[in-house]
Image (cartoon, rainbow, N blue to C red):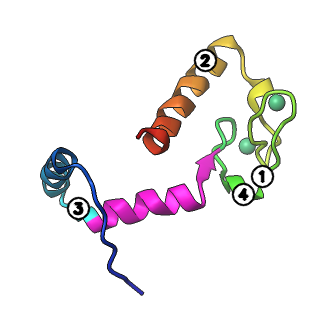
């Protein structure tokens, strides 16, 4: 079921987003819906085996603070220095999407 949602968003963001969405053949409603779905119940891919899992249902490694893949058991501890760096900045990018004021 679809429901109307009224949001107050910066005009610049709306204009830029509308332009990009129409270039991509997507609707803003769909983009917002996908972003909110991820926000409410994030699903991630294991960097080791590629299995998709919900953060909610995963255990966190007390050593590295990463979610442990329920399928292969990989967490940040199994990454080398280079891999850990890549993963850290990928995660930082994702976090900023939802934390920026
Ligand atoms: Zn895995
Ligand atoms: Zn770990």
Q: Earlier in the sequence, mark 4 or mark 2?
A: 4
Q: Are marks 3 and 1 in contact (CB under 8 Å)?
A: no
Separation of residues labelled 1 and 2 (CA atoms) = 22 Å
Q: Nearer the viewer, mark 4 or mark 2?
A: 4
Which residue is under mark 1?
58
Question: Sequence-wise, which precedes: disc 1 or disc 2?
Answer: 1
Mark in front: 3 vs 4? 4
Quick check: 61 above or below 88?
Answer: below
Which residue is at the front of the view, 46 or 6?
6
Tell me the CA gap for discs 3 and 1.
Answer: 32 Å
Establish if 93 lies above or below 39: above
Chain-order first, disc 2 or disc 3: 3
Which residue does the numbered mark 2 point to in the structure image? Answer: 85
- The answer to whether marks 1 and 4 mark residues whose Cβ atoms lie closer than 8 Å is yes
Q: Is residue 91 magenta?
A: no
Magenta-colored span: 29-45
Image coordinates of residue 91 in percent, x first then y, are 56, 33
Instruction: Kindly report the distance in space between the C-alpha atoms of the residues bearing marks 3 and 4.
Output: 28 Å
Residue 36 shown left or right of residue 41 in the figure: left
């Amino acid at each position: 079921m679809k429901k109307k949602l009224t949001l107050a968003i910066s005009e610049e963001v709306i204009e830029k987003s509308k332009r990009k969405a129409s270039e991509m053949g997507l609707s803003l409603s769909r983009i917002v819906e996908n972003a909110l779905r991820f926000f409410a119940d994030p699903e991630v891919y294991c960097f080791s085996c590629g299995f998709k899992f919900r953060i909610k249902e995963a255990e966190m490694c007390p050593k590295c603070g990463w979610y442990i893949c329920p399928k292969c058991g990989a967490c940040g501890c199994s990454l080398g220095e280079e891999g850990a760096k890549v993963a850290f900045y990928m995660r930082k990018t994702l976090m900023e999407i939802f934390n920026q004021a």
